Structure formats: structure tokens, C-alpha cells
Amino acid sequence: MYQRLSQREFVAHKGTAFTVIIEGQEAVLLTLVEVKSLGTRETGSLTIESFSLIFEGPTSPMLAQSSFEFVHDHMGELAIFIVPLGPIEGVMRYEAVFN
């Protein structure tokens, strides 16, 4: 089921853990560390907000650029496409962009 997510929803959960489900492997915990606005645009009668999320987690296993099932205690199950940004100061960083 398609679910439109807003920047505001994620801001409310900054600093909390999301469980990433990986088929055939142990789940990985990622923490939402940054929510950044990328602006808005008008499309007909809709206002579409663009934003990015930065997650941090363990350096191993490193998750590939792909869509994963994220589970959060308050937000529920979400399909999120992430891109690895690389390790920084002992943690792996990932970015998700919503347009």
C-alpha cells in the first residue's frame, strides 16, 4: 500500500531507532540523525515537499543501495530506498530522499 510520508512525521522521530529487515539476515538497527528540507513545489492542486533523511548504523553489514523494509515503534512498517554515504567516525551513514 502506498503511503505519503511527510517531513514533519520524521522530525518527530529524529534520534530514534528504525529496524531494517533484510531477507535471510539478521535485522539491522539504524538511527535517524538528520531530517533536511529540500524545498517544496506545486503540482496542480498539490504541494509536494522534498526532504532527505540521514541514518547512522553499524559499519557491518553495510547495506547496499536498495529499498528495505524499515520498522519503527510509532511509524510502523515503511519501505524506504537508501543510498550508503560511507563510514564516518566509526558509523555507516545512509541517505533517503523523498520527492
Image: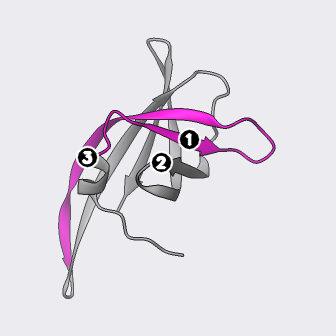
Query: Is residue 68 found inside the magenta-colored segment of the image?
Result: no
> What's the amino acid at mark 1?
Thr
Q: Label 2: which residue?
A: 72
Residue 62 location in percent, x, y?
64, 29
The reply to whether the C-beta atoms of the residues labelled 3 and 1 are less than 8 Å apart is no
Which residue is depicted at the point 23% across and 52% down? 38
Q: Find disc 3 in the rendering and name its residue.
A: 11
Looking at the picture, which amino acid does disc 2 mark?
His
In the picture, measured across the screen, residue 53 lies left or right of residue 23, that is left
Q: Which mark is residue 31?
A: none
Alpha carbon separation for disc pair 1 and 2: 6 Å
Badge number at residue 19: 1
Say whether marks 1 and 2 touch (CB < 8 Å).
yes
Number of the front mark, 2 or 3:
2
Spatial separation of the CA atoms under disc 3 and disc 1? 17 Å
Magenta span: 13-42
